[in-house]
Image: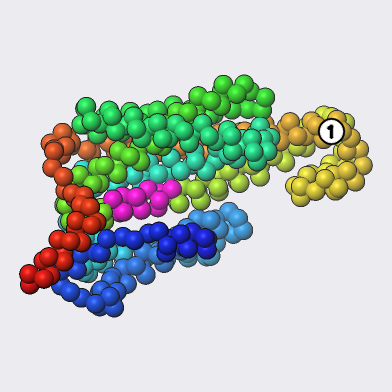
């Protein structure tokens, strides 16, 4: 966090006192935290993600470095689950939140949906840069559409949920919209009309906002009143976990495919544009380095060759991104099937307010009166 953000929090953020019915001191409450569970969770996630990130670059997937970190991380995550389930009753994951089937179904959909949702958020800007050649400002402008639609999506989901109160079909429809957006993204290629970018990114934005809002609501209404905040945090963390794994996995997919497609496309385009065969290896090496001076120094690297290679590289990148959209579609299908695990949610939507809002001044006065009475 930046220093100015910390300063703003210290100056303006004044939360209400946390409930402390036992009257424990701060240090006692800190020591009572499930530090062993925290260590298992953080270490497991870190090792598993490092293993995925190392796979294929710079190490082979069969290497001891990759397999060792992935297996160790997965083992620690399994140990964390067993510890929270059987090893402690005061862990960071309260057992009470997992008693409702719809909460557990929401977690599964949140993880699998995170594989799809975070990929479009992470790679849409890269598509704009690598395929369409946009600069920083243009890329940011192109992303505004998705961000605005994400806000509209969350509002629309809330309105629809207010009337129908059945989450299963609404979430399945939202994921179907994301699937359609991913399918349309497979059509992206250099020089295509902006309309072809407009519709899929708008659909993805609607899906991102709707899915996150709906599953957060499910986490809140299916958990006991005293664990609502914790349940929402667990649901959000599940989405982040799926997104973190997906982002790393998609990076590996993109890198592995582009390493094959890009040199081939560049070589064929350069030779077709008149580059001497004797200069091809030097040209490919210079192109991979991204150095304009190195490219200009290659014999036969004329302006026509450079323009042909630029067009070919954009097409190769577009082809590489298609593998990401195919994977996104696969996870959308898995998530839609997972929606069948939900039961009816109509009875959850009542007029009960689990956490009434009380003005700070009135609450402070009431607490003072209670203290004086004692």
**Position of 37 relative to 147 (above/below):** below
Identify the residue position indicated by label 1 in the image. Answer: 305
Give the vertical position of 284 relative to 19 (above or below).
above
- Along the viewing direction, whichever of 164 and 3 lies nearer the viewer: 3
Main structural element of the magenta stretch: helix, strand or loop?
helix
Which of 61 and 153 lies nearest the eye of the viewer? Answer: 153
**Mark 1 surroundings: few (<14), some (14-19) or many (≥20) residues within 10 A:** some
Residue at the left extreme, as displayed: 373
At x 13%, y 38%, the residue is 351
Q: Position of residue 33 (x, y in %)?
A: 28, 71
Residue 237 is covered by the magenta coloring? yes
* Image: 368 above or below 175: below
Q: Percent from the top left, x then y, of residue 43? A: 41, 67
Q: How many marks?
A: 1
Residue 334: quarter of image: top left
* Residue 235 in view in this figure: yes
Instruction: Please tell me which residue lies in front, 26 or 17.
Output: 17
In the image: residue 167, left or right of residue 242: left
Residue stretch in magenta: 232-243
Q: Residue at x 22, y 38 (%)?
A: 342
């Amino acid at each position: 966090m930046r220093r100015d953000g910390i300063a703003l929090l210290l100056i303006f953020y004044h939360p209400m006192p946390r409930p402390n019915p036992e009257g424990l001191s701060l240090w006692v409450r800190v020591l009572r935290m499930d530090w062993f569970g925290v260590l298992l969770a953080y270490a497991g996630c870190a090792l598993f993600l490092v293993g995925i990130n190392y796979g294929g670059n710079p190490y082979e997937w069969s290497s001891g470095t990759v397999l060792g970190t992935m297996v160790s991380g997965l083992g620690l995550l399994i140990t964390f689950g067993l510890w929270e389930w059987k090893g402690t009753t005061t862990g960071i994951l309260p057992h009470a939140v997992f008693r409702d089937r719809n909460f557990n179904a929401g977690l599964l959909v949140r993880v699998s949906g995170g594989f799809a949702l975070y990929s479009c958020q992470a790679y849409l800007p890269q598509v704009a840069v690598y395929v369409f050649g946009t600069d920083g400002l243009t890329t940011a402008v192109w992303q505004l559409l998705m961000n605005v639609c994400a806000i509209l999506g969350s509002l629309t989901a809330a309105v629809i949920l207010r009337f129908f109160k059945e989450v299963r079909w609404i979430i399945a429809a939202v994921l179907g919209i994301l699937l359609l957006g991913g399918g349309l993204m497979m059509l992206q290629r250099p020089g295509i009309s902006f309309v072809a970018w407009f519709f899929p990114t708008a659909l993805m934005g609607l899906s991102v906002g709707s899915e996150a809002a709906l599953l957060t609501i499910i986490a809140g209404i299916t958990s006991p009143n005293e664990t609502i905040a914790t349940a929402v945090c667990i649901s959000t963390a599940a989405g982040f976990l799926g997104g973190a794994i997906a982002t790393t996995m998609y990076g590996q997919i993109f890198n592995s495919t582009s390493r094959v497609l890009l040199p081939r496309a560049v070589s064929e385009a350069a030779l077709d544009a008149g580059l001497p065969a004797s200069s091809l290896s030097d040209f490919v090496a210079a192109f991979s380095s991204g150095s304009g001076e190195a490219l200009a120094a290659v014999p036969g690297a004329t302006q026509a060759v450079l323009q042909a290679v630029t067009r070919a590289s954009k097409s190769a990148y577009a082809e590489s991104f298609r593998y990401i959209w195919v994977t996104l579609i696969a996870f959308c299908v898995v998530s839609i099937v997972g929606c069948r695990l939900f039961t009816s949610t109509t009875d959850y939507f009542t007029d009960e307010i689990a956490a009434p809002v009380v003005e700070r001044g009135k609450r402070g006065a009431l607490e003072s009166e209670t203290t004086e009475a004692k």
